[in-house]
Amino acid sequence: MSTGSSAPKPLPTDTVTEEQGARRPLGEKLAWFVALWIAGLVVAAGAAFAMKALLGS
């Protein structure tokens, strides 16, 4: 018979919690942010130049 306990179930061990994510150094987080930002600019510029070349404007 079930007692209806509302105790939380334990998380799997491979789940990353906020505490674990907060342990990453700020410099590393900023480096990833800047790298992804630059990559986005490069992709957008490449797409713009490709469309310009294909459309002949």
Image (cartoon, grey):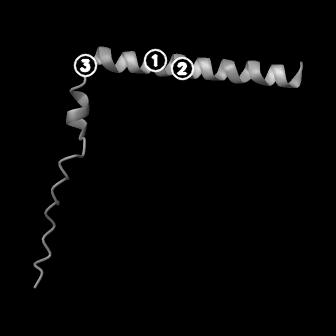
In this rendered view, identify the residue nearer to me: 54 or 15.
Answer: 54
Q: Secondary structure at mark 3?
A: loop
Amino acid at the residue labelled 2? Ala
Measured in 3D between alpha carbons, the distance from the residue under mark 3 to the one under mark 2, in whole angstroms, is 21 Å
Disc 3 crowd rating (10 Å Cα; few below 14, some 14-19, many 20+) is few
Q: Earlier in the sequence, mark 3 or mark 2?
A: 3
Amino acid marked by disc 3: Pro
User: To which quarter of the image does residue 24 belong?
Assistant: top left
Q: Which residue is identified by label 2?
A: 39
Q: Secondary structure at mark 1?
A: helix
**Which quadrant of the structure image shows residue 47?**
top right
Amino acid at dot 1:
Ala
Q: Position of residue 28 (x, y in %)?
A: 31, 18
CB of mark 2 within 8 Å of CB of mark 1?
yes
Examine the image and state in which quarter residue 18 appears.
top left
The residue shown at (53%, 16%) is 38
Position of residue 39 in the picture relative to residue 13 (left or right): right
Q: Is residue 12 above or below residue 1?
A: above
* Mark earlier in primary sequence (3, 1): 3
Q: Is residue 39 left or right of residue 43?
A: left
- Pointer 3 with pointer 1, Cβ within 8 A: no
Residue 33 image point, x, y percent: 43, 20
Q: Which residue is mark 3?
A: 25
Give how far apart the Cα atoms at labels 3 and 1 are.
16 Å
**Label 2 SS:** helix
| Front position in the image: 41 or 6 | 41
Of circles 3 and 1, the one toward us is 1
Q: Please count the marks in the image.
A: 3
Q: Which residue is mark 1?
A: 35
x and y percentages locating residue 40 in the rendered image: 57, 22
- Give me the residue at 54% from left, 20% from top: 39
Quadrant housing the N terminus:
bottom left
